[in-house]
Structures are given as structure tokens and as C-alpha cells.
Amino acid sequence: MAGLDLATSGPLERGGRVKPDHDGSLSAARQAPKRRIRLSWSDPAFRAIVWQIVIVGVVLAIGWYLFSNTNRNLSARRIATGFGFLDRVAGIPIGESLIPYNPAEDTYGRALWIGVLNTLKVAVIGVVLATLLGTLIGIGRLSSNWLMAKLTAFYVETIRDIPLLLQLLFWYTMLQGLPAPKQSWRIGDAIFLSNRGIRVPYLVWESAHTWAFYGFVAGVIGTYLWNRHANATQERTGVRPAVWPVGLAAMLGLPLAIWGVMGAPLAWELPVLRGFNFQGGGTVSPEYFALLAGLVLYTAGYIAEIVRSGIQAIAVGQWEAAGALGLRRGAILRHIVLPQALRVIIPPMTSQYLNLTKNSSLAVAIGFQDVVSIANTTLNQTGQAVEGIAVIMAVYLTISLSISLFMNWYNARIALVGR
Amino acid sequence: MTRFARWGFGAPILAGLFAGVLAIGSAHADGSGSATMDATRTKGQLACGVSGQVPGFSLPDSQGVMRGLDADTCRAVTAAVLGDAAKVKFVPTTAQNRFTALQSGEIDVLSRSTTWTLGREGNLGLNFAWVNYYDGTGFLVKKAAGVKSAKELDNATICVQPGTSTELAIADYFRVNKMKFTPILIQELSEIQGAFLSGRCDAYSTDASALATFRFSQGPKADDLVLLPDIISKEPLGVMVRKGDDKWFDMVRWTFAAMIVAEEKGITQANVDTFLTSTDPETRRLLGLEGDMGKALGLDPKFAYNVIKAVGNLGEMWDRNITPMGVPRGINNLWTKGGLQYAPPMR
């Protein structure tokens, strides 16, 4: 349907809106004369308004009907409604959580929040790893090394042809084939690999570490500022001040200095086999690992193709021209081809990030407790399916829209700027 | 195309959409007292939700026929309503979607080892009509672990299905005993059992009945698994119907009562015809030879006869399905034999 272009904007230009003039310099002669809306069906502007009102009304009416019909039917069937259950004590056990959780005291609301965090834990790390792996494989497919090109092509074709669910079950079953805790594979007395997951030593966290972390953040900001200064200096004088020594000192030296001044505490909590399982140390559970590995390897196959197509979209003349300037292949790729290829790569990449995030809901199949798993259990224990599904939808919508917004912002930033 | 032309197309479509919305708005769901019974008879089929994966309760045999206590419960109810147990349609449900399936009307009866709890009866819009198995939560461990009691399971990893009353029961049990455990929650039954067998979990917890039948189904490997003696909760496994259809509820409840009375009287699938000449008044009322018990329930006068002819009495259902798994009847016996199954008088 036509948009609400009112009299002020004048006749609509095909395929684009009239850009507002920033400085007001647009001459009055170029502006269409203002028109007044007539209350007549023959006035396009009037018709546009009427249709907008009708459409909004129809959408609201459908929404209201669905809502009231659902409510009426739920109460007719004596099914509890509302989100009051979020404040009730959950009582459901949860296997792994980023925040403390006690089923005896904590609420369904907190349980669901744990699910959201677990989903993010998979999605965020998964997106980063899939991007790195996918980019490497995508570049590998274009390699002049025959073996490299064929191996990566084989990887892409295989991984894309097998349903993700099967891959997840495959990884999970493989991990279950690992030895029991008592016979676990170990590196010294520190790292243990068994069918209970990977157990690693845990740094005993003290305030010195927190301050060192703040120092690192300050170092990153400082390096960024110094880099800007270096750019400005280079523009002005043609000589670029060295960035890396400053960066090294700020990002590594500063945190180390803070840590050292505060007594350099360094105590490790080692995992120890006691009773059924290892106690102490940090853990990567087989469920999480299988889900992460499955999602990363699967999505990397698609990302590799996106990267390859993005690179191939750059005219070969660019390579030749850069080569004529004496740049090496790696430098050409990094400085000339990839920045341009990104413009082709980013939009489809957004879809892959969204896919990875949504595919993480397959976690239920292998027992990782993401938001879908916990919401399913919640709706089962409380009997409030409509609310449970609404929570799942709201969570995925929020995460997906955030990814989209970020990627669209990034895409706009790297897009060709017409001068 | 000009904008004018676009509107020319849009107007009738929008008008139709609007009219359609109004029409839907005026149509309402019908909620008469015996709607389920009417619908079942019209379709000539009763949709009964089962698990389809638990030996002894519901599992297809080598011919694809659903066998087990829950499956026979479905048959009994179908025989009572439609006169023919073969008209049952088994609908496999998961622990997580079973209530939604019943609420939405996809199934008419849920017979899937579902524990009768206050929360479920209060929140789900569903009723428990009868208990077909008095059970309790137990633990299965590997013999090699050397565990003798549930009290020794501190810090253990426990495999359990999500969305079950088991997960709440074990959370309570470990809390009361000040112990910790790591849950592994997988919805798919074969996956969670696989995780236990592979050693991902130290113990597998669910209803003791299902543990016993699972252990039995391992064949020669059954001896490697130990069912711990501790039963940590009450799990009365019931048959569920939707709230608001009282006649349907009555039908399920009295189908069970009829099977219990039949067992009290010694009436079996094989000998029921010989009782048609009985002079015992309660037997005659049960089999529809006098009185109008069936009619009062909206059923055929011979509904109990049909049920017994189809699946036998309550004891026969047990002997056929549970006894082969090596589980003693215990509290599931008749009240006359020290059990909990007790039927109100049929008069």
C-alpha cells in the first residue's frame, strides 16, 4: 500500500523519498507547491489516509479477536492464565547456569533468565567462532594449493548436506563415548577429559584480577585514542607515530602492573575426582560442547560460501592492479579485497547469524538447557503453554532484532559512501 | 501501474478480509456437557494419548500392535464408549506435549503414566479420573558404581526427563537430604536412556515401574543395573480427561470401577459369557442384565461386558502387561488383598 505521503512532500518520486534539505539551501523554486487535503474520494492523499485507518483498524481487530478468543477459551477450559507464575518458586533442576540458582528458592522468572543467558552463551561464542572458521575455509576454497582447495570444498559440501540435528546427535554421542571420570584422559593433574566434559583449573578470582581487567579496558580505550591521534598526525605531517608499543604497554603492561602492585595473586583451583565426579575447577559440559561444535561447524560451511562469493565478486583487475603496485597476496587480500568484499558479505552473513541463534534451540535434543528447554519445562510444570511460547517468541525476537540492528548499522557504516 | 489502479484491486480484498474477520468473531466454540462423547461417536474413533515407548505401559509389539497397561486402559475406555476396543486410535505423546494435546482436543483421553498432583489438576484444566498404577520415583544405577542407597548419590549426575514430576521429586529429595546433584535433562526417552547407559549419568531416575521395565528390556545386561530400594515420592499414575465434560469423566471412572468389580467377582475375559446367567444382583447390574447403569452414564447397557470382553478385569490387565516385567503387584492389588484399588458400589 502507498505510504502516508502528505501534501507537504508533493508528488512522490518513484522508488525513493524526497530527502529533507539539511541546510535549508534548497531553493523554493524546486519545492512542489503545498496542497491542502480535500475531503473527497478523488483526492489521493485523502484516500491514502482512509486506507491507512482501515488497515490499522483491521489489524487491531484481528489482534483483539485472537487475544479475547484465546482468553475466553482458556477460561472456559479452566486453564490458568497470566504471567503470575514467573514469581512462583520453580523447583525445577537446571544443569548449568551462569548465575547462581537454587531450585528451592528461585523463581520461574530466574530459571527462564538462566535459559536466556545459556542461549546467549551459545549464540555469541558460536557466531564469533563460526565467522572465524567460515572465513578461513572460504579463503581456503580460493587457495591455489590444490589439496587445500579440495579439502575445504569437501568440507563445505559434506557439512551442508547433513541435517544439523543429526550432526548434534553425532557429536553428543561421540562425547558420550569418552571414558568415565575415573579413567579420564588427563594433562598432568590439571586438565581432565571424560564423558562428564572437560575440567580445567579455575583461577581463584580476587580483587586484583578485577582491577587488572579494568586496567585492560582502559588500555583498549587508550590504544584506540592513540591510534586516532596517529591517524591525525599522519594526515598532517605524513609521518605515522608507532602504535604498537603504546598499545602493548597500555593493553598488557598496565593490567600486569596493577596486578603486580596488588600482590600478584595467582592461585589455581584444581579439579579433583571425588565420589562420582570431579569437584572444583571450571567445566565445559558435553552438552554445551556438542551444541557449540555442531552449530559452529555447520554454520561455518555456509559462511565459507558467503566469504568465497564475496571475494570472487571483486573484479580480478583489483588484484592485478594491487599486484602491479608490488603488494603481496596476503596484503592485497587484507587491505584491498576484503574491505570491498565485506559489502557483499555482510547482508547474507546477518542471515547466518540469525540462523545460528535460532538453531541453538535444537539444544533440547541433546539436553543443553537453553531458553526453549527451560520454557518447555516451565510450561509443562505450570500448564501455561500460551505464556511459555510467548516468552520463547519474545526472547528470540529480541535477540534476532538486536543482531539485525547491529548488522544493519555495521553494513551502513562500511557501505560505499558517495562523495 | 498507477496508485489508483492498485487501490482498485485492494478495495474488494480488504472489504472481504474485514467481513471475514467479523464472521469469525461471531462463531464460538460449543461447550455442551458430553461433547467429547458425541464427537467420539460421530468419528467412530477415540483418540487416546500414550507414550508408545515404555515397555509394559505402551510399546508396539513386533506386529505393530500397541501393548501395555496404558494401551489396555485406552482399549477399555474405547470399548465402553464405542463397544469395540479396535476403534481406539493411539496417539504418541511426549512428556512435554501430553497436556497440550489433551487441552487442545487432539486426544480425548490421556493414559501416559501421568502423576496425579494438585498443581496439574488445578492449573491445567484437566482432571484425573482414576489411578491405573500407584507408583513412586526410584533410581537405577550401574552395579559397578557400588551404590546401595539413594543417600549415597551426593554429587551424582542424574539423567531425568524434563517436564515430569520426577524432576521436581528428585530436586525435593536432594534438598531435604542436603545433597547436590547435576541434572541431565533430555526430552527424548531413547536419548536420555542412552546417556545413562553410556555413563554420562551416574543414575537414571523416573517412576520405579518404568525403571523396572527399562531394566528388564536390557535383556542379559539387566544384571549390570541395580534398582535402588529407595522410593522417594508418591507417584499415582492416572488417566486424564478435560475439565468441563463431567459425563466423559464419569465414563472413565466407572470403566475402571467395572474392571475392579469384575476382578472381585472373578469375572474374566474368558469366562464373562458364563456369568450372563448369574443370579448375583451386582453381577447382573454390572453386565447390564438388570438396572440401567449404562444408560445413567450415557453408555450402552452392556458397556462393562464390552470392556471385560475386550481387555478383561483389572488383574488380567496387570498380569498381561506388568507381571512379565518382574514387578510384583504390591499396593496395586485390590483392596481385599491389601492393595489400594477399590471401587464404589455399582448400583
Image (spheres, coloured by chain):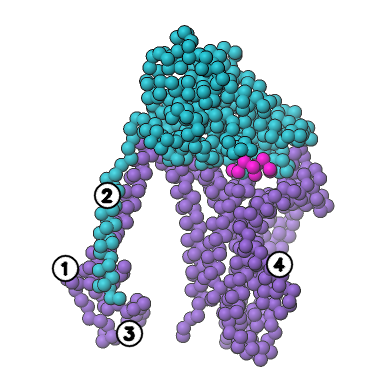
Chain colours: A purple, B cyan
Residue linked to disc 3 = A25
Give the SS element for disc 2. helix
Q: Is residue A216 above or below residue B265?
A: below
What whole-number distance in Å separates the C-alpha atoms at marks 4 and 2? Answer: 73 Å
What whole-number distance in Å separates the C-alpha atoms at marks 4 and 1? Answer: 73 Å
Residue linked to disc 4 = A253
Magenta residues (range): B187-195
What whole-number distance in Å separates the C-alpha atoms at marks 1 and 3? Answer: 34 Å
Q: Is residue A185 above or below residue B160?
A: below
What is the three-letter code of the residue carrying label 3? Ser
Tell me whether marks 4 and 2 sit on the same chain.
no
Q: Which of the numbered marks, if any, corresponds to residue B23?
A: 2
What is the three-letter code of the residue carrying label 2? Ala
Q: Position of residue B154 (x, y in %)?
A: 70, 34
Q: Which of the numbered marks, if any, corresponds to residue A39?
A: 1
Tell me whether the residue at label 4 lies in contact with that at label 1, contact meaning CB atoms closer than 8 angstroms: no
Q: Is residue B331 above or below residue A23?
A: above
Marks 4, 3: nearer the viewer: 3
